[in-house]
Amino acid sequence: MALPPAVTRFAAARLGSIVDALAAVGLHFTCYLRAIAAIPHVLGRHGRDVARLVGEISLGSASLLAGGGTIGVVFAMSFVSSTQVGLEGHRGLDLLGLSPMTGLAAALVSTREIAPLVASIALAAKVGTGFTAQLGAMRISEEIDALEAMSVRSLPYLVSTRMVAAFLSVIPLYLVGLFASYLATGVAVVYLNGVSEGTYNYYFRLVLTPEDVLFSLLKAVAFAIVVTLVHCAYGYYAAGGPEGVGKAAGRALRTSIVAITIADVLLSIAFWGLRPTLPALGI
């Protein structure tokens, strides 16, 4: 029995959309692999461009007017989010009569989860969307095609350089954000809620280990690489004029945030296991 024409057309359209989505995923993953493989080429031939991009990522243009570039954004977002951790952590533990142990929760939450996520989201929102817009504008104005016509490998020059620059920039940026997180929780718990500074510092330092800080930094670096690859790929393959570039920036931001959350869960399990332990407390 033959299917009605309307059903056949609907099935063909659905199948076509699925094939197009799989083709786009394959195109992006190919871009990621090519960009990573071109890193040695970039380090050898485009060091000056990498240094320029590091400055743009960290400070930006007119940095004093823009609040200190990405550094200012990471510091402000980390401080505000960790202030909330301190306030809500103290209120929740105070209901159980355990308010002096807020330092323990602050050290764990800020180091393992809040600081890496906030830094990566700030990087995606401020730097990643800029990468998408830059590369998308170059694509629709045929500048990328012009690079290829001049025998310049466009993908390493445009994508790999930005990935290396993000890798170099995220380490100091993340340390600034981590400092802001520790400062904010201390202010919220000690100065706003009146917990003894000595008690707070005792529990804070009891569970804060160099290993946790290292793992937290590795998470931030991994997130930065994911953000850069996703946003640059969307910009590099943008199409449809200015409207297409705008849509690519929106899709890139949504994709990078989803990828960050998935990577955060996987890395947390890899670093601390399904049942994280606190050796300093014997649990």
Image: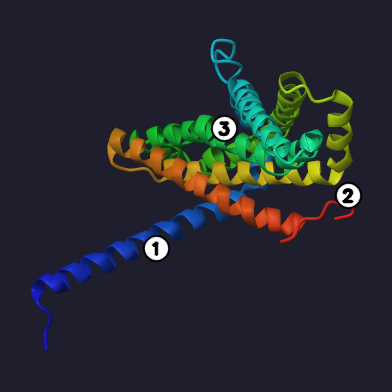
Q: Quadrant of the C terminus?
A: bottom right
Q: CA distance from mark 3 to mark 1?
A: 29 Å
User: Residue 45 placed where, x, y %?
Assistant: 65, 38
Residue at x 66%, y 47% (from the top left corner): 222
Decide which of 180, 151 is in the foreground and name it. Answer: 180
Q: Quadrant of the N terminus?
A: bottom left
Residue at x 62%, y 26% (from the top left corner): 80
Q: CA distance from mark 3 to mark 2?
A: 34 Å
User: Residue 173 placed where, x, y %?
Assistant: 68, 29
Camera-near label (3 vs 1) is 3
Q: Which callout, 1 or 2, points at the residue further toward the start of the chain?
A: 1
Identify the mark at residue 22; answer none if there is no mark.
1
Tag 2: amino acid: Leu
Label 1 crowd (10 A; few <14 / some 14-19 / many >=20): few
Q: Which callout, 3 or 2, points at the residue further toward the start of the chain?
A: 3
SS at mark 1 in the image: helix
Camera-near label (1 vs 2) is 2
Mark 3 lies on residue: 122
Residue at x 90%, y 48% (from the top left corner): 280
Query: Residue most toward the bottom?
Result: 1
Decide which of 179, 12 is in the foreground and name it. Answer: 179
Label 2 crowd (10 A; few <14 / some 14-19 / many >=20): few
Residue at x 34%, y 40% (from the top left corner): 247
Tag 3: amino acid: Ala
Whether residues under marks 3 and 2 lie with C-beta atoms below 8 angstroms apart, the answer is no
In the displayed structure, 204 sits above or below 64; it is below
Mark 2 lies on residue: 281
SS at mark 3 in the image: helix
Camera-near label (3 vs 2) is 2
Q: Quadrant of residue 79?
A: top right
Q: Answer left or right for 105 relative to 65.
A: right
Query: Residue most toward the top?
Result: 65
